[in-house]
Amino acid sequence: MSNLLGRHRAVMPRWVSLYYDDPIEIVSGKGRRVTDSDGRSYLDFFGGILTNMLGYDVPEVREAVERQLRTGVAHTSTLYLIRTQVELAEKIAELSGIANAKVFFTNSGTEANETALLLATNARRSDQVLALRNSYHGRSYAATAVTGNRSWKNSSLSPVNVHYLHGADRARFPHLSDEEFQAFCVDDLQHVLDTATATDVACLIVEPVQGVGGFTAAPDGLLARYREILDRYGILLVSDEVQTGWGRTGEHFWGLQAHGVTPHIMTFAKGLGNGFAIGGVVADGTLMDALPANGISTFGGNPIATAAAKATLDYLLAHDLQANAQRLGRLLIDGLRTAADRLPVVRDVRGKGLMFAVDLVDPGTGAPSASLAARVLEHAKERGLLIGKGGLYGHTLRMAPPLTLTEAEAREGLGILVDSLAAAC
Ligand SMILES: Cc1ncc(COP(=O)(O)O)c(C=O)c1O
């Protein structure tokens, strides 16, 4: 193992960081459990960063991919009809709630957001974009430009002209009531439009629950109030559902639905292929068709990825995994909140469905503590649980198990989490 770590360090970029003092190599998986190269088994509460949405070795997905492989065709290009691609697009268009929707498939969330920004800036003939502070939208120039988190911004070069809004930073305004905070945010949006932007603005891009940002979210309803103002100016609303889509938040199928509003454009990736590379953008057909030049994504929506994605989506809907996310999310979040009373390192427990987080602070100073988060990660690993971390100051534990999680596994994971937090106190 240490040999592999040395080889990794020799040839992989420094900025592709690994978890743990002793990083692990996952060599097999089944259900919600994985095994490392030393034969140790873990319950997985991070799912390859919310990507193994159904868990590991799901027969329905494996068989769909094997069926496609047996045809001898892994790739054809979008020059030819791809049946699974059309079927998947039909399904996503219908699920999106966007009228007359069309879908374009990509290989990643970054590319999906690039496409969304291209659609919006083209339609509005404007390079001006609004984004939320503490956001993460990917690693390309435009996606980085709308990312509001310094530790993920490698460059200030930008094809778009960005202004940032408040909303997901509720915790920074503890002196305001919920209503006061929303009124402040709405006033700020108007002020930004009046003072910082010129003529037309293309869109506002938001994560309904910020992923990398530490599962922080604007209070429910705020984005509908934003939309009222945006509509007056014809500014489009883009929802980045890369982490929040497909029922993960339990209460809704898309994260943005918590605000009672439908976006003009939605992007997705991560969980859809249950590990196979697929992302995409769904938008009003007129908006989508309006791009003036040709466009393809060579691998986007290829036969293997769309076969996996279609099988994943069919499985998710047939088993109503959104309801499972809601039920077990409640169990986990309530359990953590109860335990938090006796854990001085815990500042906040928040989340929706199977997307929940714990903020850690130094009990002496109350300052966000990234080192405590790293310690809890190690304790959880020792006890057989994989979790994630994130947040603006690296002090947030992020948990997002596969949506197929069972109640027994939820209770097991909760027990390990609480023990690991206690061990770090
Ligand atoms: C909300 C969100 N948008 C976009 C992306 C970028 O997706 P990808 O890494 O597939 O390019 C991510 C990745 O973490 C994400 O969390």
Image (cartoon, helix red, strand yellow):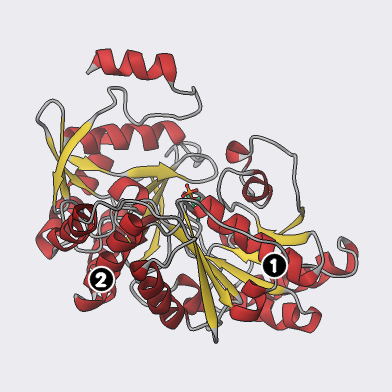
* Whether residue 252 can be seen here: no
**Residue drawn at point x = 32 percent, y = 28 percent:** 20
Instruction: Establish if 34 lies above or below 279.
Output: above
> As rendered, which of 212 and 362 lies closer to the eye?
212
**Residue drawn at point x = 64 percent, y = 35 percent:** 154
Instruction: Establish if 90 lies above or below 296.
Output: below
Task: State which quadrant residue 166 falls in.
Answer: bottom right
> As rendered, which of 338 and 79 lies closer to the eye?
79
Q: Looking at the image, is mark 2 or mark 1 nearer the viewer?
A: 1
How many numbered discs sit on the rendered protein?
Answer: 2
Task: State which quadrant residue 305 falls in.
Answer: bottom left
92 vs 170, left or right, is: left
Q: Secondary structure at mark 2?
A: helix
**Mark 2 vs mark 1, CA separation in Å:** 33 Å
276 vs 13, left or right, is: left
> As rendered, which of 155 and 212 lies closer to the eye?
155
Q: Amino acid at mark 1?
A: Leu
Q: Which residue is mark 2?
A: 316
Quarter of the image where the N terminus is located: top left
Query: Residue 263: image x %, image y %?
Result: 58, 77
Quarter of the image where the C terminus is located: top left
Query: Residue 44: image x %, image y %?
Result: 22, 47
Q: Amino acid at mark 2?
A: Leu
Please rate how many residues cluster around mark 2, counting C-alpha atoms within 10 Å: few if below 14, some from 14 to 19, many from 20: some
Q: What label does residue 415 carry, if any?
A: none
Q: What label does residue 291 carry, if any?
A: 1
Q: Secondary structure at mark 1?
A: loop
Instruction: Establish if 188 lies above or below 7.
Output: below
* Whether residue 381 can be seen here: yes
Upstream in sequence: badge 2 or badge 1: 1
- Whether residues under marks 2 and 1 lie with C-beta atoms below 8 angstroms apart, the answer is no
